[in-house]
Image (spheres, rainbow, N blue to C red):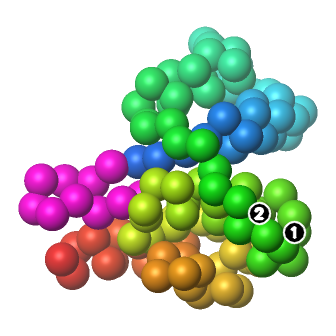
Amino acid sequence: MRIGQGAGHSLYTSRPLLLELAGILSRPKFAKKIAASHLSADQLVELYAGCVNLVKPLPVGRVASDPDDDQVLGTALAAKAEILVTGDKGLLALQTFESIRILNAQQSLDALHAN
């Protein structure tokens, strides 16, 4: 997420992260919740993609303990994000990347309300 000056906030993602999200939502453990939405996992991802700005991840080298997380960091860097919101423990352990704060959902809400 990039915090705008006074006007609001912008959400960003990338194609690799959308593909990962589609794969995650297709897991059996989400089947009941996806079915309750009356949409497919692909339709939910498509709706989400329409609500965010797409960027091409920048190369960051090998930073995170999980190589897939480097795509997340590259996306945040490309978006010039101030905050990266995640529940991923490996990313949260970094706390910051470049000048980007890495926060969980509650921490990010607290930070937004503090501004």
Q: CA distance from mark 1 to mark 2?
A: 5 Å
Closer to us: 46 or 4: 4
Task: Tell me whether circle 1 and circle 2 mark residues in contact (CB < 8 Å).
Answer: yes
* Left or right of 22, for residue 43: left
Quarter of the C terminus within the rendering: bottom left
Closer to us: 97 or 44: 97
Q: Which residues are magenta?
A: 1-10
Kind of residue at badge 1: Asp
Closer to us: 59 or 100: 59
Residue 37 appears anywhere in the view: no
Residue under pointer 2? 69
Residue 57 appears anywhere in the view: yes
- SS of the residue under disc 1: loop
**Position above or below: 13 against 95:** above
**Position above or below: 48 against 1:** above
Residue 56: give x, y in percent of width and height: 60, 43
Residue under pointer 1? 66
Magenta-highlighted stretch: main secondary structure? loop
Kind of residue at badge 2: Asp
**Position above or below: 65 against 77:** below
**Snapshot quadrant of residue 38:** top right
Residue 32: give x, y in percent of width and height: 75, 28
Closer to us: 44 or 68: 68
Residue 91: give x, y in percent of width and height: 70, 75
Residue positioned 71% across, 67% down in the render: 60
